[in-house]
Each structure stands twice: as C-alpha cells, then as structure tokens.
Amino acid sequence: MLSVQKVRQQIQRNWVVQSFCRHESVCSHLLAFFSLRTAKEFYFNDKFVTGESRFEKILIANRGDVACRVIATCRRLGIKTVAVYSVADAGSRFVHMADEAVCLGPAPVAMSYLSMDAIINAVKITGAQAVHPGYGFLSENSVFAKKLEDNGIAFLGPNSRVIRTMGDKIASKRIATKAGVNCIPGYDGVVNDLGEAVRIANTIGFPIMMKASAGGGGKGMRIAWDEKGIIEGYQLSRREAIANFGDNRMLLERFMDKSRHIEIQVLCDKYGNAIHLNERECSIQRRNQKIIEEAPSVFLDSNTRRAMCEQAVNLARAVGYDSVGTVEFLVDEKRNFYFIEMNTRLQVEHAVTECITGIDIVHQMIRIGKGHKLLYKQEDVPIDGWGIECRVYAEDPYIAFGQPSSGRLTSCIEPLHIDGVRCDSGTMEGSEISSFYDSMICKLITFGDNRQEALDTMIRALDSFVIRGVTSNIPLLRNILTEKRFISGSMTTSYLSETYPEGFRRNMLSKQEVSRLVAVGASVSVKAALRNRTLVPGDTGLVVLNLVQASNVPLSVHLIFVFFVLLVGSSKVLLTSS
C-alpha cells in the first residue's frame, strides 16, 4: 500500500505537474487532485490507448472550481490550457493555474462568461482546438455548441442537436416516453395561458409541479398544492423562465412528494457505444439545488439499479448521445422511478462517481471529443467503495438554509491532511467570494470502503476545514451528517423542511449531546473543586453543582479511582480522569 506521502512524492517528481506550476499554492492544488487515494491511484480504472492523439490546447469557458478541475486533468495528460475570465476574476486560482489567460470583459456574466463572441475570439487568438464548457453558463447552450462546430472548434460535450432536444423538457419527455422510459404523469404539450394551466392541473390532479421547459438549476419551478397555487405561481414561473432562459414555455406534471432524487451517469461515444457509471443519490437539497450527494445510493436494490441504468442508457441511445451526460429520476418509497430530465453536461457532483468507478470523467469527455471510441464494456465499471460530496458554500445556513455571503477568504485551509479526502475548489486564501457569481468555496469529497467510513471521514474533514472572512454552511452540513434519518439513509427531497421545520437553528443538540456536554462540564468543575483534597483510592462522594442544577438538569457525580460516573437526568455517563 502506498502512503499518502509517497504518492505525493511521486506526483511532485512528475514533470507534467512541475513544469507548469508557476505558483506554490497552485502546485499544492494540483497535488490535491492526484494524491488522495492511498491504496491505489485515484483514477485506477481510467482507460486510454498509449500514444493516441490528443488535443494540444483546450480553452475552458468557465470559472471557479470546474475550471480548476478541467485544468487538473489536462495537466495530468500534458494538454495546455487557456482560461477566460472576467475583470472580477483576474486574481482567481483558475487564472493562475492555466497556461494562458484571456480577459473576456466586466464582471456581469452577460458581458463575460455568457459572451459567445468573446469566447470564440479567445479560442482563435490562443489557437485552442477545443472548448470545455464546464457546468452552468454556456454548458447546455445549443447555439454556442453550434457556433463552435461551425468554426471548426471541438465542443467537449454532446452535439448541438442533442443539447437542443434534451434541453427542451417537453421534447425530452416525448422522446423518453417513446424510448420506454418511465415518465411522471403530466401534460407534455405547451401550456398557452393561465386558464389552460388550471384546467390541465385539475385533470392531472394536485399537487402540481410547474417547470420552465428550458429551465434548470431550480429556476422557473414552483409547486402548486391547489388551484390557488396555480393562479399565484404560474405567471411568476413564466417571468422567471423568460428572465433566465429567454423561453416562457411551461411544463405541468404531477408533483411527487416524499420522493428521492437519484441520477444515472452515462458515458457515450460517437460510434453508438453507451454505458452507465451507476447512480448518485442527490436528495439533500435546498431550493431544488443539491448540497450533499453520494454514490452509490443506500436505497436502491440491485433490480431497481439495473432497471434505472438500462432506461438511462436506452434514452441516451435513442437521442444519439455522444458525450458524458446524466439522466435524473425521482424514486418513490416503493422504488418506482420516473424520468425528470437529462443534463447534457458534466455534473457538479461527478467526483463521487469517480470515487467508486476509478474513471476520470473529464478525461473521457476529452477523449470522446477527440473522436476516440469508448474502451469500456459495462462489466468494466465497478461499484468500488463509497463516495460522499458536501458542497461548501459561502452562505449563512441559519437564513433559509443558505443566504449567500460575499467577502474575502482571509483564511482557507482545506483538510487535505486526512486520508480519503479530495477537495475540488476554485478558491484559496485571499480569494474574493463575489456577489456576481456562485458562492461555492469547495466541493469536499470523501471516500471509503463503505458508507460509514466515508461519513466518518467527512465529519472529520468538516471539523478540520478552516474558513474565515465569510460565513459558510459547514454547520448545516455537519449537523445533517450526524442526524439519525440521514444516517439511516431515510431521506427525500423534502428532507430539510421535514428535519428542520422551523429552519436550521444554532445549537441544535440532541438529548444525548446535551447529557455529554453537561457531564464534561460537571467533571471539570468537580476536578477543580477537589484539587485541594487528598483522595484515597476507592473514595466515593456525591457532589452537587448548583450551577448545573440552575439549568434544571438533575445531576450527580461520583469519582471512583480515575473515573467519573455521572447521572445526568436518566442517563449514565462514564468519563476518565487524568
């Protein structure tokens, strides 16, 4: 077994990393991606043909953590990279990591990361042969993909026709139905006005989910529990859809309460080959956005997993998919599953799939984009261990489970000293968390031989993560990981509202935790009170602490040899004394 230190030394001797690291913190960041697995290389199952053709230079049309993630794989492969950035991101980590960097314009995304002409101009200036769109921004924009195709530039994602088709929730649902994929009961046509929406909703039956046909990321979505909810929410959803996607078409379908969000990762090439990389459990969400993901799902049995994966691959084949993609399902308590949508891009949570399969998903996207065939058969894809991801955001978890917080990271120490930890981040000490963009600080990933091992490592990693200068959501993440429903695997997409009906609050301690804290405090007080006494081994005494009793907690403390035996309420606690 290789120790972490030995793997680090091997990576540090690698000329690919050394020759391109222009900054000590950047070198440390690259090492973080490739020095985390102790028993084997992290990408132990990443297949390619030695000497196969590669792109010489790739431009990443994104920012933050995903730009750093793509650059890391390119560095491992010896591919040069180009970063594009806004004025607000000029000092960001991904800009320092890239071999070249081109400023797109001012901070607003419409003038920078969504400016197709500026990005294509940067490709031409730098001589990049391909563009990786990351996730968000232009990653699922069929017009952008088509413009790149027309300019002879490889788009590292599916072809523009597939993006356009699967990005339309109405069209994708029709294709899924034709391919034999289970779909949520609903209306797959265009809803023309409020009156029609009310009539359709009454036909389907409440509750109803209203979705923007071109939407994603939770935008343009509302739940209506009755006819009044349709009347109040329909126009709001339409306005939100037109503002975010330029398309106000709405989709109505039955809202599945008490369901899980489970997605299947697919991998397809340009020759009709398609496989799945198993599932991810993504049910812990706030405002329809995921905050904790894991792979595999604790809920699926082998038959359900097989059926979901088969339907996902069948859908990918039906639409002519030719890259990395994700098919999302809702799964009810009886393990009935229903198609939601297909994301035609790299997912934020792809790392947990890499943990259990050993496949570098970004590398395979690049290979497929270059025109290479998949080298995998389905039986080559394992479920090896367990991976968990926590999205660490700069936000206040005590306000609506996460109100964005902006400012400078005056201190940021990632817990990379812990075995089984991976940090995919776009920040470093001194980074500015801007109000212009997503407030993510880091995707904290842990892995182990089983779920409990991965959970234990994640708890330790969260406790060790140092963040100062901005408020983070670590208290919420930490609390979820030790909550009994989560530990048992009994979660749905309503988990947060059900577990914290009054919102997340400070000092939410269980009775057992209160007892332990009282016990420790009482023992410390007793030790202080007894320092001037000479105790004979075996001496037993009852000590009453008025300070603790003032909190209405019945308490007695007994000292026996080097042990404190405490009765806190109805609980007995044993502590050792130094």
Image (cartoon, rainbow, N blue to C red):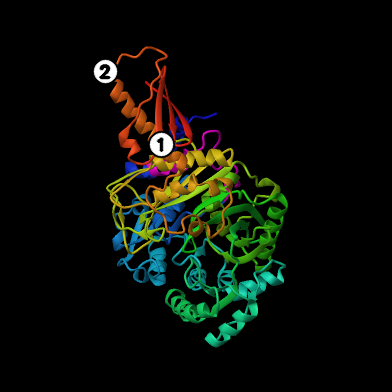
Is 556 inside the magenta-drawn segment? no
Instruction: Inspect the image, locate mark 1, and give the three-letter code of the amino acid beneath it.
Output: Pro
Magenta extent: 28-52
Seen from the viewer's position, the closer of residues 169 and 283 is 283
Seen from the viewer's position, the closer of residues 270 and 202 is 202
- 423 to 266, vertically: above or below: above
Q: Which mark is residue 554?
A: 1
Which numbered disc, 2 or 1, marks the residue that appears first in the sequence? 2
Asked whether residue 379 is in view, the answer is: yes
Q: Could you tell whether 527 is left or right of 318 in the image?
A: left
Residue 94, position in %: x, y?
Answer: 37, 53
Residue 402, position in %: x, y?
Answer: 39, 58
Q: Residue drawn at (62%, 52%), measured in percent from left and top?
A: 277
Residue lying farthest top? 536
The residue labelled by disc 2 is 532
Question: Is disc 1 surrounded by few (<14), some (14 to 19) or many (20+) residues within 10 Å?
Answer: some
Is 38 inside the magenta-drawn segment? yes
Quadrant including the C terminus: top left
